[in-house]
Image (cartoon, rainbow, N blue to C red):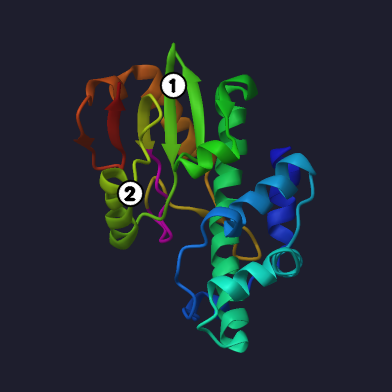
Amino acid sequence: MLKAYLEFLASLKLDNRLRSIRCLEEDLRGELNPACLLDELFFEKKQWVDFETFYDMYLEAKLEQLQVRFQDKKQQDLLKGLKARLYRTQCGILTEYQAFLAARLVFGEQYVHRSIAQDKRGVDFSIWHQQKTYHVHIFVDSSRAWYYRQYKSEFKNVEQSAGIHINFPYALAPGKLNSLYYLPNGFGVYTPAYLHYLHTELYSGKLLKNQVCGVKEDGFIYRSIS
C-alpha cells in the first residue's frame, strides 16, 4: 500500500503560490474540520483525491456553513483564502498519512493505528510496542511549529491519551536525520531511515527514561502521561 500511496503523492500537481495566501487563518473546527472529510475519503472510501478535487468536494459540502461562519468576509476573499488553507492543510495531512503507512511497514500493521477520533485529540497515529503505547505527533521542525506544539500541550489537552507522547517532527531543509525526501514533483515524505531510527529508540527503551520531559539533539521530546 505504501508504494501505491507514494506513486499517488508523486502524481500530485503542487502549487506553491497557495502557500503564501493567508487571508483565512481561523481554525476550521467541528464540522468544518477538513481532516474529517479527508479521513473518510482516504481510509473509508479508499479515494485518494488531488488538491483540486478535494477543494471542490469540501466546498460543495461545506459552503453554506462557511458562509454563516465567515459572514464578515467577502465571498471572493473567503474562497481564495479557503483554497490556500485547504491546500496547506491537505499537504500536511498527506505527509502524516505517509508517515503512518511507513510506520506500519517498520512496526507491523497490527501495531500501528490511527483514527479521526485520535486526530481530534491531537494524535496522528499510535504504536503498540513492548507492552507500551506511543502516541506520535507530527509537525514541521521549525521554531514556529515547536511553539504551537508546546502551546497545544499546555493549553489544548492534546496529551490526554494514556501512554508515551512522541514528537516526530520533519525538517524541510536537507542534511538532518529527520529531513524529508522529496519526490520528483517536490512533495516531501518521511525517509525509511528516520522510521527505523524511531524503531531503534523504542526498542532500546530510551523513551521510558524521559518520564517528565527530555530534549535530545535529534529533535525528539518525550512526555509520559499516566
In this view of the protein, can residue 16 be seen by the observer? no
User: x%, y% of residue 28?
Assistant: 52, 62
User: x%, y% of residue 68?
Assistant: 59, 73
Q: Is residue 90 magenta?
A: no
Q: Is residue 1 left or right of residue 65?
A: right
The answer to whether residue 211 is above or below residue 122 is above
- Looking at this view, is 222 or 155 the one in front? 155
Residue at x 68%, y 71% (from the top left corner): 64
Answer with the quarter of the image where residue 208 lies.
top left
Q: Is residue 169 magenta?
A: yes
The kind of residue tagged 1 is Thr
Q: Which residues are magenta?
A: 167-175
User: x%, y% of residue 212?
Assistant: 19, 29
- Looking at this view, is 188 or 85 the one in front? 85
Residue at x 70%, y 58% (from the top left corner): 10
Image quarter (top left, top right, bottom left or bottom right) of the N terminus: top right
Compare marks 1 and 2 and give the one earlier in the sequence: 1
**Marks 1 and 2, Cα distance to the nearest angstrom?**
20 Å
Q: Is residue 30 left or right of residue 58?
A: left
Mark 2 element type:
helix
The kind of residue tagged 2 is Lys
Q: How many marks?
A: 2
Q: How many residues crowd around disc 2 within 10 Å: few (fewer than 14), some, or many (20 or more)?
A: some
Q: Is residue 83 left or right of residue 156?
A: right
User: Which disc is residue 152 wearing?
Assistant: 2
Q: Is residue 143 left or right of residue 200?
A: left
Image quarter (top left, top right, bottom left or bottom right) of the C terminus: top left
Mark 1 element type:
strand
Q: Which residue is mark 1?
A: 133
User: x%, y% of residue 35?
Assistant: 60, 52
